[in-house]
Structures are given as structure tokens and as C-alpha cells.
Image: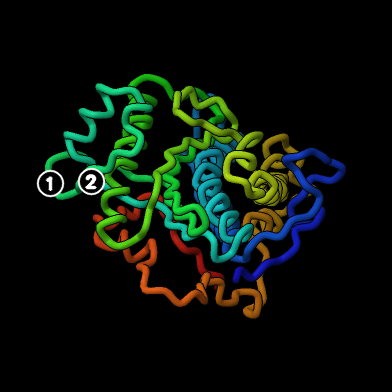
Amino acid sequence: MHNQNPVSTTSGMHSGCKSAYAPETANLPIELREAVDTALQECFDKIYCSDELLGNKLTQVKGPLDSLSKRHGILLEEAIAHAFVAAAGDRFEVQKQVEVKVSREAMSLVESNQLEKLEGLNLPVDNTQGKKARIDIVVFDHETADLHVISVKRGGGAQGGSDARNARKDLTAAGLMLKNHTLRKGLPVLAVRQVLIDWYGRSGIVGRPTVTRTTVDEYFGIPISGFVAAMSAYMSSSIAQRMMPRLMTAIGRTGQTTDRQMENASRPPLRDKDDAGDNAHVSTKSSVRPSLAECLSDLPPRRQGRQMRRVCSS
């Protein structure tokens, strides 16, 4: 069970902001809050190369903001994965960043057939010829026996051309391979549901189906949007706190902010040791069925490039 802390208006929510996507209070797991803090510290600890047009002071404002948008995309995946466990406990098994070897045959089927004709197919993964596709989130629903193969895009700007086409094909082909793989391992998957979560809806990727922050709760039947919004609000508030000293310096009002204050504002608040409890999800069901993690354990190990390095408090 997740160790959760309430997020109030003083620790991440915008004061006076009320909408379906910015709830006033929400519970966030400790590990998700720590992931946000780590992303912020990495971005604000870095010294960015001065842009001749902007000058060094403005560069140190722009640099973290550019980086944080990309980090937010990774944190969206983390928050969505946590939302499945927080909402339904033992019902869902969740794995993140699953790498699948997609055969040439699978890619050929996807490229030459409409999605409706591919439903119900499952292809073997024995063929060593092909490409690697990384799936952001894989979820097995014990209640319906559906395997959800999920690609997450922040969708803040258009991702067109070959990148968009490849993302759509990879998602479909990987789903065909994963169904066969999990069935062979003993997990009773009845159907594979490939879905693109285009959070802000502006990625430009045509996926079927595609859900956004306004439709994701209805599609999966669990509350996800509010959970993610709470994470984003916590991140937004923390960005504002850390950015203020840099903005003051950039506009020449350095008398109001000392270098020491800038350093302190760039770092996340210290947390008591008792806050970091054991958050591992443990299923109490007794069954001979393999877990989703066991089914996927012999797939190629994922690369570490997308992981944010751990920042330890001194």
C-alpha cells in the first residue's frame, strides 16, 4: 500500500484555482513526490551555457523551464501508473517501461492492415529479427483479463512526421507480441487493449483509441485525471518557488534575494526519515498464476536513459 501525504494549498496547489484538473486536495504517494523533487533539483542544480542573445541571467531562467517540460512527460507516466494501484489495489498489475522485440512480420501486418483486422491476433516473440519497441505502461486487469498496452505522450506540441507514425505502429505491434508472450507464461489474457494517452491532446499522433486528460477516467473506469493533476500542481508550485530568486536576479532586484536564498530555494525541503516507508504493492491473493512482472522478466532489459538519477540528501 502506498504511503501517502495530503497535498494542500501550501505544498503544491495553486491558491484559488478550482477545476476538474486542479483539485484543492489530493493524496500523492511519497515516491511520486520524491520523483518530482528529484526532477526539480536536477534541473535547478545545473548551470546552463549562456545564450548570447539572452545573456547569462535570463539563460538560467529559460534553461530549467525548457528541461522541466520534458521531465513532466516522464512524471506523467509515473503518476498514471500510480493511479492504477491507488484506485483499485489488487485489481491491477502495473509494469513501466517494458521493452518488446517486435518482429518484422508483426510490423508488416500492422503496416498492411487496418486495426480492426488485427484484433484478436497474437504473434510469437521467438523471431530475433526486428526492432525494439518500448512501451510506457503495461497493465493487467485481473477483473476483466485485459492487458492494457499504454503509450503516454504529454501532447503539449505537435509530434508529426515519421515519429508520429512509428509511435502508432510500435504500440500496435508490441500489443500483438505481448499477448502471445503472456499467454505462454501462463497469464490468462483475454484481450489486448492498445491505447495512446495524449494528455493535452496536441501530439498530432493518430492512435485508435486515443484518450486525453478529459476522457482517460471514463476509458479506464478509474480516477486518473485528478491524481495526475495533483502531481502537476505540486510540481508547478515547486517550480514557482525555485524560480523566483532567478527571476529577481534577472530583472536586477538582487537586493531582495541573496545567493544563499537562491541556493536554498533550488533544493527540495528535507523530509523526515519516517516519511519514506515501504511503498511496495503486495498482493495477498494466493494463486499459481504468474505475476505480470514474472511474465515480462525475460524480455530485454530496458535502457536506463529515461531514468532520472537519484539525488540523495546530504
Which x, y percent locates residue 33?
Answer: 62, 60
Say left or right for 302 vs 211. left
As drawn, 293 above or below 139 = below
The answer to whether any part of residue 24 appears in the image is yes
Task: Name the residue beneath numbered marker 2.
Answer: 101
Q: Residue 128 carries which label?
A: 1
Looking at this view, is 178 or 82 the one in front? 178
Looking at this view, is 275 or 113 the one in front? 113
Q: Which residue is painted at 28% across and 48% down in the image? A: 100
- The number of callouts visible is 2
Q: Do the residues labelled 2 and 1 touch (CB within 8 Å)?
A: yes
Which x, y percent locates residue 275?
Answer: 65, 75
Q: Which residue is painted at 13% across and 45% down in the image? A: 127
Say left or right for 273 vs 282. right
| Disc 2 from disc 1: Cα separation | 8 Å
The answer to whether any part of residue 245 appears in the image is no
Q: How crowded is mark 2: few (under 14 residues within 10 Å), some or many (20 or more)?
A: many
Amino acid at dot 2: Lys
Amino acid at dot 1: Thr
SS category of the residue bearing label 2: strand
Image quarter hosting the N terminus = bottom right
As drawn, 140 above or below 69 = below
For marks 2 and 1, the one nearer the N-term is: 2
